[in-house]
Image (spheres, rainbow, N blue to C red):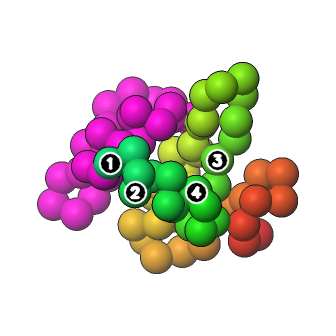
Amino acid sequence: TRIVSGTVQPQLNKEWLRSSEVRKMLGISHGTLQTLRVKNILPHRKVGGLMYYKYQDILSLFEGGETSRPNGHGKT
């Protein structure tokens, strides 16, 4: 996925993205992504040792809307 003219455009129709994909898509560092998780700005799910993020939640951030928070993480 890439950000083009302020919009996020999917290249792979995936519902869940790994941390590395989210960092690349948003152009942010590992630390920034961790801050988004800790502050409950970007909900996530941990499976094994990997973090996954819902693509729709990332789009919601750009649209200024609230994100769904699985398993009680963040706003509903």
Are the residues tagged 2 and 1 within 8 Å (C-beta)? yes
Residue pointed to by mark 2: 32
Quadrant of the drawing holding the N terminus: top left
Given residues 49 and 21, the one toward you in this image is 49
* Residue 67 seen by the camera: no
Up-down: is 65 above or below 24? below
Label 1, residues with CA under 10 Å away: few <14, some 14-19, many ≥20: few
Tell me which residue sits at (71%, 28%) in the image. 47
Residue 59: % across, % down: 45, 57
Which amino acid lies under the numbered mark 1 shown in the image of this protein? Ser
Q: How far apart are marks 3 and 2 (CA)?
A: 14 Å
Task: Determine which residue is flagged by label 4.
Answer: 37
Dot 3: element? loop
Nearest to the eye among marks 4 and 3: give it. 4
Q: How far is the residue under mark 4 from the one under mark 3? A: 7 Å
Q: Residue at x 72, y 66 (%)?
A: 74
Crowdedness near tag 4: few (<14), some (14–19) or many (≥20) residues, C-alpha within 10 Å: some
Q: Distance between the residues labelled 4 and 1?
A: 13 Å
- Residues rendered magenta in the picture: 1-28
Q: Is disc 4 in contact with disc 3, using a CB cutoff of under 8 Å?
A: yes
Q: Which amino acid does label 3 sit on?
A: His
Q: What label does residue 44 carry, if any?
A: 3
Q: How far apart are marks 2 and 4 (CA)?
A: 9 Å
Which of the two labelled residues, at mark 3 and mark 1, occupies the earlier sequence position? Answer: 1
- The secondary structure type at the circle numbered 1 is loop
Sequence-wise first label, 2 or 4: 2
| The stretch drawn in magenta includes residue 26 | yes
The amino acid type, in three-letter code, at marker 2 is Thr
The reply to whether dot 4 and dot 1 touch (C-beta < 8 Å) is: no
For the C terminus, the quadrant is bottom right
Name which quarter of the figure residue 67 lies in: bottom right
